[in-house]
Image: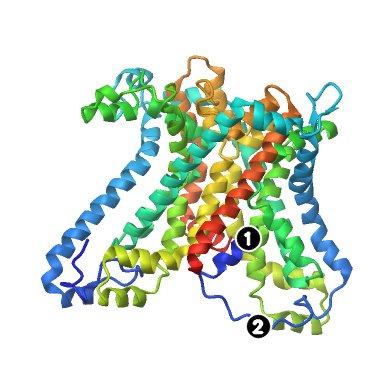
Amino acid sequence: MTAPVLTPAAPRQSEPQPPRPARPARRRTVSLSPRLRMQRTLLTVTIVLIVIVQVYPLAWLFLTSFRTAADFAGGNPFALPSEWTLDNYARAFDTGNLGLNIVNSLVVTLGSSVFIVLAGMMAAYALQVLGFRFSGLIKALFLLGIIVPVQIALVPLFIDYSQIGLLDTHLSMIIPLAAFALPMAIYLFSSFYEYIPREMYEAASIDGAGPYRIFGQITFPLSANTIITVVLVNSIFIWNDFIFANTFVLSDGLKTIPLGLQNYIGAMGNTDWTATFAAVCVTVTPLLLVFLVLNKAMISGLESGATKG
Amino acid sequence: MAESVPLGVGAAKPRPLRRPRPMSTSMLPRRSRLSVAVFLLPPLLLYGVAVLLPIVQSLFLSLFRWDGITDMAFVGIDNYVKMLTRDDVFWTAFGNALGYLAICLVLQLGGALVVASLLTALPRARELVKTIYLLPAVISTVAIAILFQRIYSLEPVGLLNQVLAWVGLEGLQNAWLSDVQTVLAAVSIPEGWRFTGLYMLIIYAALIAVPRELEEAARLDGASWWQVFWRIRFPYIRPVWITTTIMATTFALRGFDIPYLLTNGGPGQASELLTTYMYKTAFVHTDYGYASAISVFIVVECLVAVGLIFLLLRRRDDS
């Protein structure tokens, strides 16, 4: 790509640190400037193209939700809607149970998050802070869950649920969603607890605090950032969960968003596509907004979740 | 094995100096056994009920023939024998699952590495690109399935076929989801597309942590861009690369939603994955024993895959 002999000291544009633009370096290599500038333009164009291809389907989804049905059936799919309409949204709300679906998704997401955070903190506290003889073994047992596919639990849980009458409840979704997210949460909390200095606990201990008070007054308050990370990252997966909901929930009143959307296609034989797209937009928007508002926290959460786990 | 996942990754970033660990495993000077139990048992119960117990139950059920209504009949390892020797659909599904895995890995890891490398060279707006690129990961699989059904459609002409028409390749227009030749790729691509942003993010974070001094020293020695990449950058991010490979592989092996929603394994068995086959065996044919055997196989497959990844990517590290 470049001739190394001719450009021994040429600072490449692959500058790792965002806050350090290549300004001083560029001055030193005036002769290369046009070429660097061209490379940079080429690079920018490439990235813009990639980004467009990546996001266009989503933009198209939103555009289509404002099309008339005739426009959708006959028109050029890339064109802007010839006539903007909100009818699709009206039909989407008429045919489905969107409001109810959103409430159910909220219940499941919040319920699972509470379980994940509480159980994750408690287990990490027991494993990392309190410590005990076989803590390494128990930790390995938990971490094994990171790679266990959820499919293994479907048949057994379905049978167990039907025996104890838990099928078709919010809890039937919350329990496995929380349990399968637990290993990663325990890992994140543990690796954070490792950094809380021992001296802090010793000081509290001298003041007479036992393990419960220390958890409530030191460990828990310090965990705030990790809690946010864990909740944000898991919310994406739980909000969008399809497989557990599809397996354990039968009645319309309990259906979460993914199941509600599926109904649009199944129920109407001849699918009303523009209304379906409107429904998709309605259900996608809440998480999308949360993501756009909190994207800094979410991105760093995803990064740390992966680079640590 | 599972425990070495984080350990391998931890090597990528500067760890705090591990202070000499005293004999006690506890960070607290005083704690009772009871307090350990109070904190440990509730999470262990949740995990045991929904993860560990089902694994044991699946192993148990896989030795029986059972439709959920009549009495269970013990058949020993017959379910496994049937699966491995007499069931063509199983092998078709296994082959498809490997194809699905391959496409997902190329799109997610290959795509992520290319875009992340390009992004490190972008002078500005990196945060914006990251955010936009990650958007599809936030969308539910059902929404994605609905979307791609229209992208692939022929009647009315969907996005893909329209693009082909514009570039003069009308001849290639196709009903991608009902063609046996293309359907597997067609159901794999949405899955690859959806998470490529996630892996890009992780790899990008690793790439910008590569010390610049290393790269610059290599360039002073006359290394080309390609050499800098393979000799300096890639070895440096290898631990993170192992993690992302494991994530992408295990996610792809358990991939279910999009093929199930888009084609339900069809036409024929052309896009049947082990997961969709297992699901149908369990909840359409209510053959719980055989479905459990397949799900045990899926777990074994994931464990083997993780083991292989460690073996392959680690060994090169040592040499």
Q: On the image, numbered disc 1 is attached to which residue?
A: A227
**Residue A12 in the image: above or below residue B313:** below
Q: Amino acid at mark 1?
A: Ile
Is residue A54 rendered to the left or right of residue A218?
left
Is residue A269 rendered to the left or right of residue B4?
left
**Colouring rule applied to residues:** rainbow
Can residue A79 be seen in the rendering of this structure? no
- At numbered mark 1, what does the secondary structure look like: helix, strand or loop? helix
Can residue A230 be seen in the rendering of this structure? yes
Host chain of mark 1: A
User: In this orientation, which residue lies closer to the viewer: B178 or B141?
Assistant: B178
Q: Quadrant of the C terminus of chain A?
A: bottom right
Q: Residues within 10 Å of mark 2 (few under 14, many from 20)?
A: few
Q: Quadrant of the N terminus of chain A?
A: bottom left
- Residue at (56%, 27%) from the top-left corner? A262
- Residue at (76%, 61%) from the top-left corner? A138
